[in-house]
Image: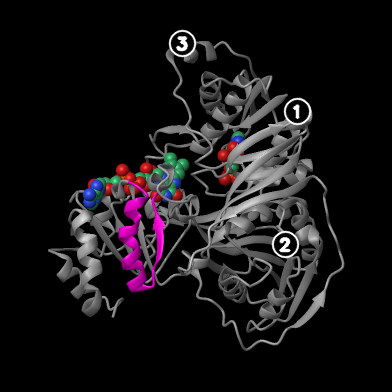
Amino acid sequence: MSTLVIAEHDNGSLKGATLNTVAAAQAMGADIDILVAGANCGSVAEAAAAVAGVGKVLVADNAAYEHQLAENVSLLIAEVGAGYDNIVAPATPNCKNFMPRVAALLDVAQISEITSVESADTFQRPIYAGNVIATVQSSDAKKVITVRTTAYDAAPAEGGSATIEALDAVHDAGISSFVGEEVAVSDRPELTAAAVVISGGRGMQNGENFKLLDGIADKLGAAIGASRAAVDAGFVPNDMQVGQTGKIVAPDLYIAVGISGAIQHLAGMKDSKVIVAINKDEDAPIFQVADYGLVADLFDALPELEAKL
Amino acid sequence: MKVLVAVKRVVDYNVKVRAKADGSDVDLNNVKMAINPFCEIAVEEAVRLKEAGVATEVIAVSVGEKSCQEQIRTAMALGADRGIQVETDAGVEPLVVAKLLKGVVDKEQPQLVILGKQSIDGDNNQTGQMLGALANMAQGTFASEVVVDGDKVNVTREVDGGLQTVSLNLPAIVTTDLRLNEPRYASLPNIMKAKKKQLDVYSPADLGVEVTSHLTQVKVEPPAERKAGVKVADVDELIDKLKNEAKVIS
Ligand SMILES: Cc1cc2nc3c(=O)[nH]c(=O)nc-3n(C[C@H](O)[C@H](O)[C@H](O)COP(=O)(O)OP(=O)(O)OC[C@H]3O[C@@H](n4cnc5c(N)ncnc54)[C@H](O)[C@@H]3O)c2cc1C
Ligand SMILES: Nc1ncnc2c1ncn2[C@@H]1O[C@H](COP(=O)(O)O)[C@@H](O)[C@H]1O
């Protein structure tokens, strides 16, 4: 059995989500190769070759793959993946964009966001906003899978010595092009990989007040997240949304501030090790999942917390 | 230009769905059903394109049992001109839905197909992308802005770190994210009018598609329960607990 893992990267560095995916691939018990599709992505290939347990790194380095356009990358993966039993990628926004295209090109199902490998053909995945865990068995000879990265500890980034092989195949579907991007740079840890996450909701009232979370995040080395309501209201950018349809996080410590605890929000954070809720409404549903609940006005509690940490 | 919108019938987003005690399936007895929220956003976007004079006709399509005609009527009450139901059993897999939608695309030749990014029951996030591959169309997934410009459409997408804009040749696929628009409510007169709009029913065979199954649901179960927590009296107690009991901060 063989598994092809699709690398998540930004052409400069290999993203941690790839390491969690390698761990999931190891659970499938097959030989693992990694595919890096990008442009000027040599350093990513080198990082991928250092990951423990990887046999071969395949690199498709071409302008057609620079922005990971789904139309192009899916053609490449379907071609390269033809020789593998499993094609596995992290369930990041980027890979979610092209993996279903790969599955359709190969005429197989995609199994989205698996949290457990039960056997070579049987997997678990959350459905209905994580209120139900389904065990599904695939009858496809080839399996296209995305992995919920929070369900797997990262494979060691060092210790491997995979060979690197360049692919010349260039697939440019010619039907889409990259126009531009607005990407915020932050010094904070990545939301999905941080050990501590502090999130604000509608109770924060405006974007300015999110600064109240900054000092605490600095002290705890935390990433900052948000509820949908906070994002919709324009307090903070969209990529901070935690939840069923945003980012899934499972840090050691999750602090929810001014967040009521809707099903859709819980879906994104209820696997955190320790949950703290700060809310002025003692009946807020968030308290039902919180290990430690503080009924308080956040405008009093946050400055005090920052001062005392 | 014609716009095709795919709408799915799902459990209402307020319902907390549970696994049946015997683990055979989820318990959907007497729960409220609704149009998938992302599909509602898709309908709204299509209707706005029509109101802006960009689209000439908006067609709502749903794949499923007869009951999904309710959601097609909802889409028509929101402004879709006509509807198509592809009649299948419930629970058709995304790959098959995509094949059936491809059949409808071949028949109707829309310039734009708008879908939700995700159904909130299966949480698949697959169908739009699969349709893109089958129909060899470009895709703008997780869209927060859609601007048709001649024979192209510019789609701004919600990605890791922020927003990305891509330019797609038409015909193209768009899947909606939450910030694309805020759907309107259907007015009573429009709900009445929707009852009279045309709704065609096709079988998979009419579209030349075989309904296959690639996945079997072996069982369903509830997720691990969290044990009930405690309320702390003040910030001091919170810090003490985090340091000395949970040991997550130092
Ligand atoms: C299709 C769909 C997908 C969705 N996806 C997501 C998702 O991915 N993530 C997500 O988060 N939501 C999602 N939602 C939205 C979700 O249903 C809720 O509407 C949202 O989570 C509410 O955000 P909130 O808790 O910040 O706001 P609210 O529910 O308004 O809660 C605000 C809370 O702040 C408290 N508060 C107010 N002032 C103070 C104060 N001064 N001090 C302390 N506490 C205060 C209030 O008591 C209240 O509990 C989705 C909804 C749909 C339909
Ligand atoms: N049975 C269906 N009928 C119509 N559209 C569907 C159906 N299933 C999925 N879709 C469309 O595909 C989107 C994504 O669904 P999914 O891939 O299941 O997460 C939905 O928001 C719909 O627009």
Q: Mark 2 vs mark 1: same chain?
A: no
**In the image, is residue A283 part of the stretch drawn in magenta?**
no
Horizontal and vertical percent position of residue B82: 63, 18
Q: Considering the numbered disc 1 on the image, is that residue within a helix, a strand or a loop?
A: helix
Residue ID for mark 2: A142
**Residue on which disc 1 sits:** B206
As helix, strand or loop, the secondary structure at mark 3 comes to helix
Q: Position of residue A54 (x, y in %)?
A: 68, 81
Numbered label attached to residue B189: 3
Q: How many marks?
A: 3
Mark 2 C-beta closer than 8 Å to ligand 2: no
Which residue is pictured at 73% across the width and 38% down the height? B172
Where disc 2 sits, the SS reads loop
What's the residue at 22%, 77% (across, down)?
A: B245
B61 vs B248, nearest the viewer: B248
For the residues marked 2 and 1, what is the alpha-carbon distance in whole angstroms? 29 Å
